[in-house]
Image: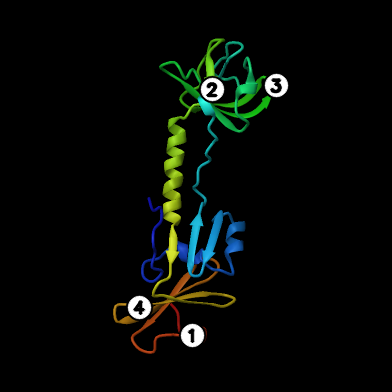
Amino acid sequence: MKLCKTYNPIGIDQQDCIDTWLQRFEVLINKRRIEYVTICQYNIKIIGGDTMEVMYGAQIDSVNTQLLSSIDDSQTSFDVIDASVLPGTPTKLTIGYDKTITETILVTLITGNILTVQRGVEGIARIWDSGTNIARIFTAGDYNAMINNINEIADGGTIQFITTDKFTDINYVYFVGDVGSDWKVNRYDIDNVKTTSSGTIDKPTTLLDCQNLVYT
């Protein structure tokens, strides 16, 4: 399965173009626009971004423990019989996973056998009896987060400059390409603002050519 898209920077606006500034990618990382970049010649692969969802680790065999006492629907701290069998925090646990109706919680802290949690992460916070099973189970939320993140990676994709020339200076990056029988230059600044220049003759072939054009 190939999880990537190929973009042509010339033509329709592509936000990814500005993210490919080789001199600027560390600034973009600091802005949390992207999380990981690999650069190979003119191929830039962008993984991650602002809309990636947190994915929590799984646990082999989903080892369970039980609630030590009954809990109401508002408690955010309670005891289990043996917290040592649970995965480390943060993690998601499902209360009553062997019942028709369940509640998945987010565990933020484990102190001894005491869990500090966020209730109703999936399902509605409920009253539970002592002895109710609780374990790390693969949930609908886990699946949805995985699908979302796969789609995000696909949308980040691999940007390939095949027939496009790229030039950079201190202030701008220039993409030069063909649009039918004409040429077009997309110029981007560090704030993602794009201006363009186009023509039919004397296609720019150098950085100086791009700098001397009139952009609108």
Question: Does label 4 or label 2 sit earlier along the sequence?
Answer: 2
Q: Which mark is residue 206?
A: 1
Counting from the top left corner in percent of width and height, residue 80 is at 62, 16
Q: Which residue is mark 4?
A: 178
Task: Give the residue type that dot 3 points to.
Answer: Gly
Give the residue displayed 46% in from the left and 70% down from the top: 194
Q: Which residue is mark 2?
A: 135
Task: Give the residue type that dot 4 points to.
Answer: Asp
| Helix, strand or loop status at disc 3 | loop
Counting from the top left corner in percent of width and height, residue 213 is at 46, 85
Give the spatial CA distance, label 2 vs label 1.
Answer: 62 Å
Q: Which mark is residue 49?
A: none
Question: Does label 3 or label 1 sit earlier along the sequence?
Answer: 3
Counting from the top left corner in percent of width and height, residue 108 is at 62, 31
Give the residue displayed 60% in from the left and 11% down from the top: 69
Give the spatial CA distance, label 4 vs label 3.
Answer: 66 Å
Q: Which mark is residue 112?
A: 3
Q: Is residue 165 left or right of residue 131?
A: left
Image: 75 above or below 203: above
Image: 111 above or below 161: above
Camera-side mark, 4 or 2: 2
Q: Badge 2, how many Cα within 10 Å: few under 14, some, many 20+?
A: many
Question: Does label 4 or label 3 sit earlier along the sequence?
Answer: 3
Give the spatial CA distance, label 2 vs label 3.
Answer: 16 Å
Camera-side mark, 2 or 1: 2
Give the spatial CA distance, label 4 vs label 1.
Answer: 15 Å
| Helix, strand or loop status at disc 2 | strand
Task: Give the residue type that dot 2 points to.
Answer: Ala
| Helix, strand or loop status at disc 4 | strand
Question: Does label 2 or label 1 sit earlier along the sequence?
Answer: 2
Image: 93 above or below 53: above
